[in-house]
Every structure is written in C-alpha cells, then in structure tokens.
Amino acid sequence: SLGGGLEHHAGKVAAVNDDGTYNIAYADGDQEEGVKRLRIKRPGDQNPKALIAGMRCEARHGGGMQCFDGVISQANSDGTFDVDYDDGDREQGVPAELIYVQEIDAVAAAAEVAMASAAEKEPELVEGDTIEARFGGGPDFHSGKVAAVNGDGTYAIDYSDGDKEPAVKRLRIRRADDIRPETLVQGMRCEAR
C-alpha cells in the first residue's frame, strides 16, 4: 500500500533490508524504501477475517497517511478497534480498514495471545512440585514430582511408580490449581489424541 494508503498497488520487492523492511518498485514507476511487511501482500493474499486484541499491527493514526506500530488493545462492539501505539499514544475507535496485519501473523498472534493468557494463569512449576503428567503423551495422568526444570521449558518428571521422563512439555502436566484455556484459537499449539 503506497505510502500507507488504503489501496494496494502492484509492484515488486526491489530489496530486502537488514532491519526487516523492504524496498518496493511499483509497476507505475514509483519507488518506496523501508516498507514494513505488514503493508505488503502477495497477489491472492487476503486480510484476516478477524482482528483480535493483542495482535501486532500498524495503524494510520487519526486516519492520516502515516502508519505507526502498535497493538490492538480492544475490539469494540461497533466494529472499530482501540490501538496502543509503541510510542505510548493510544487511539480509540480505529476503523479496521486503517489497521494492517498479515494473515499469517494474525493467526500466530491470536495463538500467541491465547497461549500467553493461559500461561499467565498457569502457575510455574518448580523442582519438587507434586504433579500429575501424561506419561509418554498417553491419555492417562500419573502422579509424580518435578525432578528438574529444563532450560527449554520442559520438565524432568519422576513418577510415583518409578518411571522417569527427562523432557515433558507443560501441556502434559497438571496441578490441582492449574487453569486451562476455555477456548482454543486457530494456530494455538496443542496436543491431541
């Protein structure tokens, strides 16, 4: 979208910059440097069907031509969105057509937001915690203790029956005070049987 406007214009990526932006050579001869990925779409790409609070975005502050980085902080009942900009500004009632996100990023962001929200509610495990875990990824939970907290976010588990597992994902472990997400979001990491 040339200059952050509403319309997308045909062009080609002329250069990929070290800062993650792109230089674009438009079909009409115009050129633009430092274009953020959020403002670029490939032919056939569609905007996400839903914008979700927590999504990273670029938005045209005040309806102007310049885009600013931010996060959608709230979806409003009238179809507009509130945006918290990275520079500290906040704007309410931003129309969806002034907000740019990538479809792939939208799914990832929605999943990340949901997982972060769930992770905030799940107490962290520490060595010695009494837990139940699904041994080998099976359907049944077995009692045990956290033997170690691994640097990659997994846990070593010593089961009450003497079995051991060196790297169990948090999703396979529960405590009585665990809270699981009530809803699943497309793109959310999970385990299924």
Image: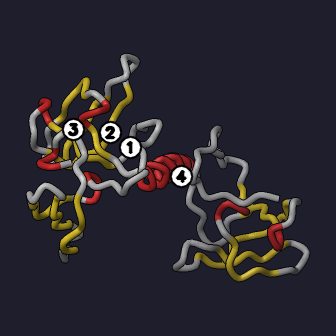
User: Percent from the top left, x then y, of residue 104?
Assistant: 45, 55
Badge count: 4
The secondary structure type at the circle numbered 2 is strand
User: Percent from the top left, x then y, of residue 160?
Assistant: 86, 72
Eyeballing the image, is 113 above or below 82? below
Distance from disc 4 to disc 1, alpha carbons, whole Å, reads: 11 Å
Distance from disc 2 to disc 1, alpha carbons, whole Å, reads: 5 Å
- Identity, as a three-letter code, of the amino acid under mark 2: Ile
Distance from disc 3 to disc 4, alpha carbons, whole Å, reads: 32 Å
Of the two numbered discs 2 and 3 on the same chain, state the one appearing first in sequence.
Answer: 3
The residue beneath circle 3 is 6
The residue beneath circle 2 is 72
- Identity, as a three-letter code, of the amino acid under mark 4: Met
The residue beneath circle 1 is 54
Q: Is residue 193 left or right of residue 35?
A: right
The secondary structure type at the circle numbered 1 is loop
- Identity, as a three-letter code, of the amino acid under mark 1: Gly
Q: Are marks 4 and 2 in contact (CB under 8 Å)?
A: no
Of the two numbered discs 1 and 3 on the same chain, state the one appearing first in sequence.
Answer: 3
Residue 12's image quarter?
A: bottom left
Seen at 84% across and 60% down, the residue is 141
User: Which quarter shows the C terminus?
Assistant: bottom right
Of the two numbered discs 3 and 4 on the same chain, state the one appearing first in sequence.
Answer: 3
Q: Which mark is residue 115?
A: 4
The secondary structure type at the circle numbered 4 is helix
Of the two numbered discs 2 and 1 on the same chain, state the one appearing first in sequence.
Answer: 1
Q: Are marks 2 and 1 in contact (CB under 8 Å)?
A: yes
Distance from disc 1 to disc 3, alpha carbons, whole Å, reads: 22 Å
Seen at 18% across and 58% down, the residue is 27
User: Percent from the top left, x then y, of residue 117?
Assistant: 50, 46
